[in-house]
Image (spheres, rainbow, N blue to C red):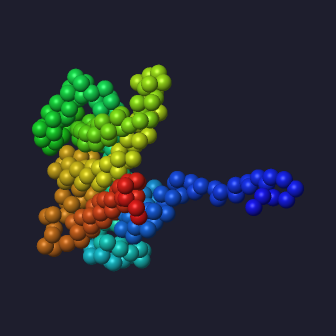
Amino acid sequence: MAPPNGVSTVVLPLPSAPEERQWVTTLKRLARRRTALFGLAVVAVVILCAVGAPLVTVFDPIEQDINQRLKEPGWRNAAGQAHVLGTDHLGRDILARIIYGSRVALVVGLSAVLISGVLGMAIGLVSGYFGGKVDDFFMRLADIQLAFPFILLAIAVIGVLGPSLRNIIVVIGVSSWVVYARVVRGEVLSIREREFVQAAIALGSRDGRVVLRHVLPNAFTPWLVVATLDMARVIVIESALSFLGLGVQPPTPTWGGMLADGRVYLSTAWWLATFPGLAILVTVLGINLLGDGLRDTLDPRLKV
C-alpha cells in the first residue's frame, strides 16, 4: 500500500550488534574443552612455580646435608621445616629440586622450539611458495636430516663442544626444524593456489609482500599447534639427555638428572625417581592436552 500524500518512506537498516572479537571467540571455544583447560592449568602452574621458585620453597636445591639423606616424604628437620617429597642421597630437598628443575625444562623447551620453529617456518614458506628446485633442495635436506639419528648427532656435538645449557638448546633447535618445514610447506602449497593470493599476484604485489601479508598469517595456525606439541617432545629429549649425562651438568637440578640419581635407590628410596618422573609425565601431558585443544579450536573446519 502506497504511503499517504505520495510521501515515500525510507527504511533504515537496524544497527547490527558489534561483531565479537576473534580472540574472544577462540577463548570461548577453547573453554568448552575440559581437557584443554586442564592442560592450560598444568602449564600455568609449572610456569608460575618456575618463575616464583624462591617463593614456593624455602630450601636451596643444591645445599647438601648428609645427616638428612634419604628421608621419606613428609619428614621434618630440627627446625620444623617439612620436606614434603623427602630428601635425596645427598640430603637435598626433592620438591625444591623439582621446582628449580622446571626452569631448565622450560628454558630448553621454549628456546629450542623458537629456534626450530622460526627456521622451519622460513624454510617451509620459501619451499612451498617458490617450489621447483628450491623445494627439491630443502625437502631432500629434510630427508637427510630425518635419516640421521638424533642421539648420535647430540653425542657428537656435545662431545666436541661440551655439555651445557646453550649447547643442548642449539642441538635440539637446529635438528628439529623438519617437522615445522613440512607442515608449513603443505599449507603453503594449498594457500598459494587460493583466489586472494592469485589476486594479489595479478595486482602486481611482490613475492615477499605476498608471502608476509597473505601466506604467512594463514600458515601460522598449524605452525602454532605443532610448536605447542613439539615443546613436550623437547622436554622429554632434554630429560633423556640429562639422564645420560649429556645435558646440564650437576649441581644444577634437572628432572632427567634426578631420575639418573634415583635409579640406584629404587628399592630403598622410591621417591627419588618417582616424583621427578611424575613431574615430567604431568608437564608433558598438560602440554599435549593444551596442544590438542588448540588444534581443535583453531581448525575452522571443526565446529565446537
| Residue 121 visible in image | no
Residue drawn where x is 19% and y is 64% of the image: 262
Q: For this view, does 96 lie left or right of residue 14?
A: left
Front-most of 100 and 192?
Answer: 192
Q: Position of residue 34 (x, y in %)?
A: 39, 70
**Residue at the right extreme?**
5
Query: In the depicted view, which residue is nearer to us: 84 or 167?
Result: 167
Q: For this rendering, which residue is in front, 43 or 57?
A: 43
Q: Is residue 278 left or right of residue 154?
A: right
Q: Residue at x 24, y 59 (%)?
A: 258
Viewer-nearest residue: 162 or 27: 27
Query: Is 149 left, or right, of 30 in this rendering?
Result: left
Q: Which quadrant would the C terminus be assigned to in this image?
A: bottom left
Q: Quadrant of residue 116?
A: top left
Q: Residue at x 47, y 21 (%)?
A: 204
In which quadrant is the N terminus drawn? bottom right
State whether residue 95 is above or below residue 107.
below
Report the side of 294 relative to 259 (left or right). Answer: right
- Residue 164 location in percent, x, y? 27, 41
- Residue 40: x percent and y percent? 41, 62
Residue 245 seen by the camera: yes
Q: How many marks?
A: 0
Residue at 38 percent across and 41 percent down: it is 219
> Quarter-wise, where is residue 176 in the image?
top left
Using the image, determine if residue 169 lies above or below residue 38. Answer: above
* Residue 23, position as x, y percentages in the image: 52, 54
